[in-house]
Amino acid sequence: MNWPISEGLRRYFEVQFQLERVLGEGGMGAVLLATERALERRVAIKVLRREIQSDAGLRERFRREARDGGTPHTSQHRAAVQVW
């Protein structure tokens, strides 16, 4: 499969997750469907596109979106996912 992440990052994820497929791609990144090996549960992993991983401003925006998505006021919403 042609993953939208570097080979090194793919190997890093595959220690803990069985990567299954790309769910979607957008302007900043992609979402991968995976199964967490230890707990045998399906998860979605959002990653930055390779082309923009070196941009410090976009990396910070990505971190901020992940952090804000995990706040108590949004984590109870039915459309929100757990972030960790």
Image (spheres, rainbow, N blue to C red):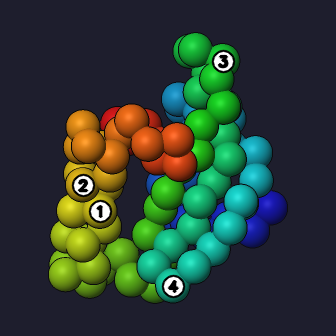
Label 3 or label 4, whichever comes before in sequence order = 4
Q: Which residue is mark 3?
A: 40
Identity of the residue drawn at 71% across and 60% down: 22
Label 3 or label 2, whichever comes before in sequence order = 3
Q: The residue tagged with tag 3: helix, strand or loop?
A: loop
Q: Which mark is residue 68?
A: 2
On the picture, is 58 further left or further right than 18? left
On screen, 72 above or below 69? Answer: above
Q: The residue tagged with tag 4: helix, strand or loop?
A: loop
For discs 3 and 1, the disc positioned in front in the rendered view: 1
Question: x, y (%) of residue 27?
Answer: 51, 85
Callout 2: few (<14), some (14-19), or many (20+) C-alpha neighbours within 10 Å?
some
Q: The residue tagged with tag 1: helix, strand or loop?
A: helix
Q: Which mark is residue 27?
A: 4
Are the residues tagged 2 and 1 within 8 Å (C-beta)?
A: yes
Q: Quadrant of the C terminus?
A: top left
**Gap between marks 3 and 1 measured at Cα:** 26 Å
Q: Which mark is residue 3?
A: none
**Gap between marks 1 and 4 measured at Cα:** 14 Å
Amino acid beneath label 2: Asp
On the picture, is 56 further left or further right than 53? left
Question: x, y (%) of residue 59?
Answer: 26, 71
Q: Which mark is residue 65?
A: 1
Identity of the residue drawn at 19% across and 78% down: 56
